[in-house]
Image (tube, rainbow, N blue to C red):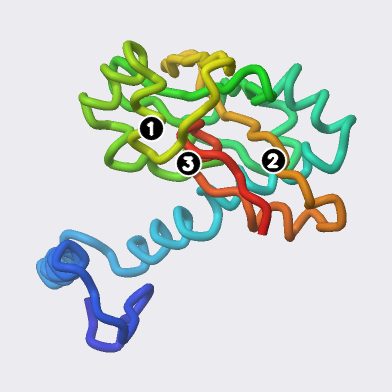
Amino acid sequence: MSKDHTHHHHDAPVSEIESRVRRLEQLLVEKGLVDPEAMDELVDTYENRVGPRNGAAVVARAWSDPEYKHRLLTDATSAIMEMGYAGRQGEHMQVIENTPQVHNMVVCTLCSCYPWPVLGLPPTWYKASSYRARAVKEPRAVLKDFGLELDPSVQIKVWDSTAEVRYLVLPMRPEGTDDLDREALAALVERDAMIGVAQVSAP
């Protein structure tokens, strides 16, 4: 990487892992193994064109547009493509809705199948064998580890993503958000709520 090439590098302190990644990136560029422009394109794709902000936009629209919500729950792939979010790992989508009676969470027990166009790259914990095994056997305990304690009356359903279908949780819209527009609603929605290990809170 050239000295003036500074995508996503800031003056703020960085973690040891971030520092190691930057050094590795610079070494790969210096040895001609990685094209800086291709690297920028890849970073831009996952920071700006795919990722949780896309999923949050889908959720916010579903909360504010009943007709869209119906399409999303009946044909998620088409409804998500309607918003311009498509591509690898997003070809076969299903959206599952949380309700006061049922809480959904997603896991991939075999590997790490994950809807990249709407959630970006999977977090490390999603790929960990401990999460993949425990989510199915003791989902309530796993949710508690994430800080989410549900009432015993709430049923928990665990959905296993595969190469054939990938899931996105439609969280419950928090109370007190009736006056928020779609952009403000999307700002409330974080990745973990769309995996089902968190809930969305009012601002």
> Residue at (61%, 44%) from the top-left corner?
200
Identify the secondary structure beneath mark 2: helix
Mark 3 sits on what residue? 192
Instruction: Tell me if label 3 and label 2 are in contact, CB under 8 Å.
Output: no
Q: Earlier in the sequence, mark 3 or mark 2?
A: 2
Q: The N terminus is located in which quarter? A: bottom left
Q: Earlier in the sequence, mark 1 or mark 2?
A: 2
Q: Is residue 66 visible?
A: yes
Is 13 on the left or on the right of 72, as rendered?
left
Query: 32 or 19: nearer the eye?
Result: 19
> Residue at (16%, 62%) from the top-left corner?
17
Instruction: Tell me if label 1 and label 3 are in contact, CB under 8 Å.
Output: no
**Which disc number belongs to residue 59?**
2
Q: Earlier in the sequence, mark 1 or mark 3?
A: 1
Mark 1 sits on what residue? 144
Q: Position of residue 88 (x, y in %)?
A: 48, 33
User: Separation of disc 1 and disc 2 at Cα?
Assistant: 24 Å
User: Separation of disc 1 and disc 3 at Cα?
Assistant: 13 Å
> Residue at (33%, 33%) from the top-left corner?
126
* Residue 181 occupies quadrant: bottom right
Identify the secondary structure beneath mark 3: helix
Is 112 on the left or on the right of 193, as rendered?
left
Considering only vertical position in the picture, is 114 above or below 19?
A: above
Considering only vertical position in the picture, is 115 above or below 120?
A: above
Q: Is residue 117 visible?
A: no
Identity of the amino acid at label 2?
Val
Identity of the amino acid at label 3?
Asp
> Residue at (38%, 66%) from the top-left corner?
40
* Residue 93 occupies quadrant: top right
Between marks 3 and 2 in the image, the one whose residue lies nearer the viewer: 3
User: Separation of disc 3 and disc 2 at Cα?
Assistant: 13 Å
